Image: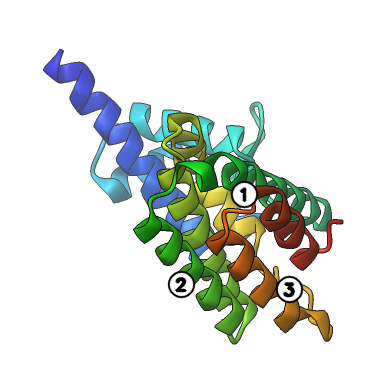
Amino acid sequence: MDGRRRASALVDDAYRALGEAIVDGRLQPGDRLRDVELAELMGISRTPVREALQKLERIGLVEVAANRYTRVAELTDRARTDMREYAAHTIAGAIRVALPRCTDDEIAATVDLVDRMRDAESSQAYVRAILVFYRHIASVSRNLVFVRALDQTDLVLRRNLDGWECVSDDAREVLFRQLGAQITARDTNGAISTFLALHGFS
């Protein structure tokens, strides 16, 4: 049993290390990923590295052509668009579940995180802020599926949401104020509608 746990931990460690290197750009699109070299670099056997690469392939960070190559996947416009759509609607779903269950302190914390999103001065800062908001909403939803799904998609969310911002027109400030007020009032439908509108979905 201990051996299986250790093997699983090695896979998780390799998955996280390789995924972080892809997200932060140390590994670039098209870079070849050779399990022998990676295993030697990490000081582990090839098996956990291969399993980690398979996990990264399943979330779209790695692409594999059998007997040809394993490499870092390209970040396409389609991948960005799909992820923005997924993130906006998944966070909206978490809001629907979370708001009726939040304590007053959790509502106040949620509004503070909305303010951080509003005040983000760059796309990179905005993506960080919205993912903090998402993790908070998933937690206070008290729904383990939201929490686990976020854990499993964290790496690909961070990579594929690069460049994402909310709407930048004159309605932005109004929408953020409106979202904060709706969360405070526990107006679930209103908060969902405003959150989606902030991200170009109406």
Q: Earlier in the sequence, mark 2 or mark 3?
A: 2
Q: Is residue 27 visible?
A: no
- In three-dimensional space, the C-alpha distance between marks 3 and 1, rounded to whole angstroms, equals 16 Å
**Rendered location of residue 113, percent (x, y):** 48, 69
Q: Which mark is residue 112?
A: 2
Q: Is residue 92 visible?
A: yes
Label 2 and label 3: CA atoms lie apart by: 15 Å
Residue lying furthest left in this view? 2
Label 1 packing within 10 angstroms: few (<14), some (14-19), many (20+): many
**x and y percentages locating residue 76 in the rendered image:** 78, 55
Reading the image, the residue beneath label 3 is: 175
Write the residue at 69% across / 71% down. 178
Q: Nearer the viewer, residue 46 or 184?
A: 184
Q: Name the secondary structure under disc 3.
A: helix
Q: Which mark is residue 91?
A: 1
Identified by mark 2, the residue type is Asp
The outermost residue toward the right is 202
